[in-house]
Each structure stands twice: as structure tokens, then as C-alpha cells.
Image: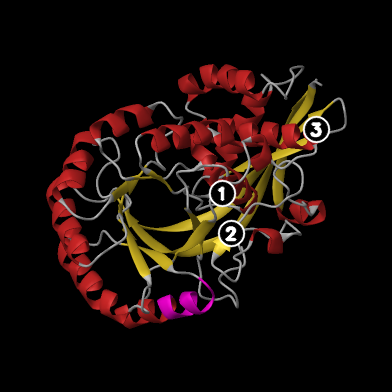
Amino acid sequence: MKVTRVAAHLLRSIQKAALLPDQAGLRSLDVSAVLVEVETDEGITGVGESFYRSLDDNRFLAGSVRAMGRHLIGKDPLESGQRWQELYVQVKRSGAYGALSALDEALWDIKGKAAGLPIYQLLGGKTTPVRAYATYPLGKSIDDVADGARWLADHGFATMKIPVGRGVAEDRKLIEGLVPRLPDGFGLAIDANTTYGFGDAQAVARVAGDHGIAWFEEPTEHLDVQGMAELNRSTAVPIAGYQTYNTHYPAVELLKANALDVYQPSLDYVGGVTAAVKVGILVETFNKRLVPHTMGPIVNYTASLHVAAAQRACTLIEFPVLTRDIDDPGRVHTGTYVRNVEDISLRPDGTVAPPDGPGIGVDIDWETVRALQETELAVEA
């Protein structure tokens, strides 16, 4: 089998989220996407997906997919491990990790379709059930967020994550005011999106630990390994991160430093299925938790479900609920171009699972893709 064509479909905005605090200030998350096709000479086509925070950034991503895709033309897609290494040699000089991730997902989709098996079976099969937690935008008031928690609980979620990072006093007020208003047994995680320096992060972490917060995500700059390790040692709340790292290699130093308790590789950036699986294996070795980051479009989310299902260190995965303006928060709403949404949506018991179809298992509505598409970039033999 040989790759004959690689195409990147640049899709316009799928969903906007509320303002989130990060180092650049308050920014909105614009979920547009680059949907990738990898075609072969045996008629099997694989799909993968990645995204950046804006349509303009995704134009760069689509161009990167086309540039990286030329290294796949004429090669065997079933040798996904070797293809990953060849692409990584190129990517570590260019920084196009989103392109590597989407292309790797597409190669695994081809492998599954060629074998007639879902990706999770190729990875060893399902392990423990995986529950979903809801990432939820910050409301206008504490009562508004508490109302959102009750809405999520009514639809089967047992945990929510909200953004923090607006200052120690504001975050303390939010945590202390919100926790007593949560439904019984409902968990809360917080995410600072790398906003804080060490001192402020430690102050918020102590408040979080005192109130039983499930984890404190990206409290400081993600490259501050020693700072995160000190937070992890000195405070009761588990420290989480990894979505802003690419490949599995940095996990070694983070694990040796005990910098994180919760590892959150993002398949759209870490290097696809191949790298995320290796992160999971390393995390399991150190008895840490794997909780994949899935704040993105629908095909990438589905690929993440396959990795989650096959990893023993994973019992929880992110489920983006980016707006209150929907009837059912348990139905995936980060893409209208997949027909079998019910197969990947929240189940009544609060769990999620990958579809059982071959490969990633998504049924793409290509007519909708064409309607959403701004442009298509391709390279072929």
C-alpha cells in the first residue's frame, strides 16, 4: 500500500467559547479545524484533524500539512511508527506539530480500516471504563457557574473544569463561593492556562487544596518544571498539564521531577496517536493519571477516545461544553460534519467510548465539509 495524495481541508469556525484567561489576557477560543485526508493506491483513505486558536492560524496549519504530506507520498502508511519518525525529523526543525498530529491520526485510521478494526483494538483493546468531565466556560457570576454545574450533573457529568487565573483574590472568591453550591458528589477542577507566576500559583493551589479541587491545571508557565514540581510537593491539590507539550520525550523529565500528577496530552498537538500512547505508557510506569486534553474539533476528539480506552492509566477524558446555548451538553457539538455523533457522545452512566467502526470510526459528511470549507490544499504523486 502506498500514499498517493494528502489533502488539508481548512474549515471555518465551528464553535466559539467564552473568554478564557491566559498569558495574553482574556481571549476567546475559536474552534475552527483542519481536516486531513490521506489517500492510498488501494482505495483506503484515512482522516485526521488538528486545530489552532483561530482561522488565520489554521491557514498556516493547512499549509504545514501540505508541506509535511509530501514526505508521505509513495510510502507505506501501515508502517505508521516509521512514518512518524520520518515526519518528526522534519517537524522538530519546523515546529509543525499540529501537522504531524493530524497526519499520524490519518495513518492510524488507514491501519484500522485495512485491518477492519477500530484503533483501540490495534492498541490492545479497552481497559477500564472512561468517564467524561465537562470543560465549561466561566459564567457571569458564581451563581451562574453553579447553575451550569447542576445542568451538567443532570445530563450525566460528575466533574466540571472551569478557567481561573484572574488574580489570587478573584480565584479565592470563586473557589470558596462555588464549592458549597455544587451538587453533592460533583467534582471541580480549575485551569489557569499558564497565567501565574510561582507565588500566586502557590496561593491559589493552597485554596484549591483546602476545598478538595480535583486538580489545578497549568498553574504556571509549562516550561517551569521545577516550579510545578515544588507546587506538586508543597500543596494538596494535584498539579496537571502537558497539553502544551509536543511528543512523548518531555514526559521523561516531568515524571522524574514529579512535576505533574495528571498528564493531559492533546492529540492535535502532541504528535497524534503514536505520541499520546507513548505518554500513556510512561505515565502508567510512574503511577500517574492520563486524562487526555480534547479541547478541539470532533474527529480529533474521537481519535482521543481510542487512546483513552486502551490506556490503563486513563479513567477520565475531557469533554468540551463550550456554550450553554445547546439542549444537551453530553452531545459532541464541536463539529457538524460527523454523522454518527451518538456513537461518541456521553452515555447515561457518564462514560464515553470510541466507536466500533474500523479506524477512527467517524462517518464524515463530506457535503457538510465542503460547505464549511474555506480552502483545500493538497499534494499528490
In the image, is 336 to the left or to the right of 116?
A: left
Q: Which residue is mark 3?
A: 114
Give the numbered dot on residue 211.
Answer: none
Q: Residues within 10 Å of mark 2 (few under 14, many from 20)?
A: many
Q: Which amino acid type is shown beneath numbered disc 3?
A: Ala
Q: Which residue is mark 2?
A: 352
Magenta residues span: 149-156
Question: Going 57% across and 47% down the picture, which residue do you hit?
Answer: 309
Q: Residues within 10 Å of mark 3 (few under 14, many from 20)?
A: some
Q: Which amino acid type is shown beneath numbered disc 2?
A: Val
Q: Work out how far the residue at label 3 is from the one at label 2, CA to CA, in angstroms.
A: 25 Å
Image coordinates for residue 23, horizontal then vertical, percent: 29, 49
Q: Residues within 10 Å of mark 1 (few under 14, many from 20)?
A: many
Question: Going 63% across and 63% down the picture, which residue do you hit?
Answer: 345
Question: Vertical placement of 273 versus 234: above or below?
Answer: above
Image coordinates for residue 111, horizontal then vertical, percent: 73, 32
Q: Is residue 139 magenta?
A: no
Q: Work out how far the residue at label 3 is from the one at label 1, CA to CA, in angstroms.
A: 33 Å
Question: Going 12% across and 49% down the picture, which residue do you hit?
Answer: 199
Q: Secondary structure at mark 1?
A: helix
Q: Which residue is mark 1?
A: 55
Q: If the image is split into quadrants, where does the N terminus sit? A: top right
